[in-house]
Image (spheres, rainbow, N blue to C red):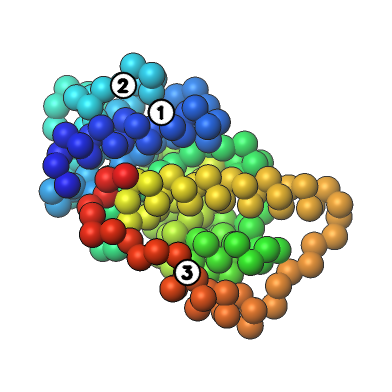
Amino acid sequence: MNEQLLRDGIVETSRRLSADGLSPGRSGNVSARFNGGMLITPSGLPYDVMSRNDIVFVDREGMPSGDLKPSSEWQFHLGTYLKRADVMAHVHTHSLNATILASAHKPIPAFHYMVAVAGGDDIPLVDYATFGSEELAANVAGGLANRNACLIANHGLCAVGHSLDAAYELAAEVETLAAQYVKLLELGEVHLLPAAEMERVLELFKTYGQPPRNEDAGG
């Protein structure tokens, strides 16, 4: 994809996350694979004033270009791209219900078949580590090794996809599932789907909907 269009897509996705309440304030960050490295939102810049020129390029060695610092979480974004060739975009949010579960150290189990949207029979929880640290990057890489979304203990949510739109939509879907699961826990009784059923759902999801368009990480 054209670099300027991809930069615009990152800005648009960031503002969409903020407007939809998935990344309140200056929280969260968005990136997309580009030119052997990635383009990522800058550190601490409000989404409503962010422009395409503020998006930071970070090469595969972790070296940023330009005057602005990349998001403090650049390490787990870059680590994802280096380990998952199929991932083209990465969204990190502090959405309400996903963060509640993450802070309670509760992964999202197979209480509903749509949990499979993240690529498995659960949405895992990875261990807490200080934001921006190599340890956190390693934890997130482990959580996303076989899933397209994971919760980070006492922190938030990560979601990846073949495009910015796909990563955003998965983050939104996981937040919906998190809200449902929080309500279910309030009732005090959780009935999980059996592993065999989740295997069937995962197989069906492989051909569900329309195939991805031939595009890069853009929306």
Label 2 sits on what residue type?
Met
Residue 8: x, y in percent? 25, 32
Question: How dense is the environment of label 3, judged by Cα within 10 Å: few (below 14), some, or many (20 and up)?
Answer: few
Give residue 208's mark.
3
Q: Nearer the viewer, mark 3 or mark 2?
A: 3
Between the residue at mark 3 and the residue at mark 2, the CA separation in whole angstroms equals 36 Å
Q: Quadrant of residue 189?
A: bottom right
Residue 21: x, y in percent? 55, 31
Marks 3,2: beta carbons within 8 A: no
Q: Quadrant of residue 110?
A: bottom right
Question: How dense is the environment of label 2, judged by Cα within 10 Å: few (below 14), some, or many (20 and up)?
Answer: some
Residue 24: x, y in percent? 52, 27
- Residue 202 visible: yes
**Tag 3's secondary structure?**
loop
Q: Earlier in the sequence, mark 3 or mark 1?
A: 1
Judged left or right of residue 61, residue 80 is right
Say which of 49 and 155 sits in front: 49
Q: Nearer the viewer, mark 3 or mark 1?
A: 3
- Residue position for label 1: 15
- Residue position for label 2: 50
Judged left or right of residue 42, residue 176 is right
Q: Earlier in the sequence, mark 3 or mark 2?
A: 2
Count of marks overlaid on the render: 3
Say which of 119 and 154 sits in front: 119
Say which of 129 and 90 sits in front: 90
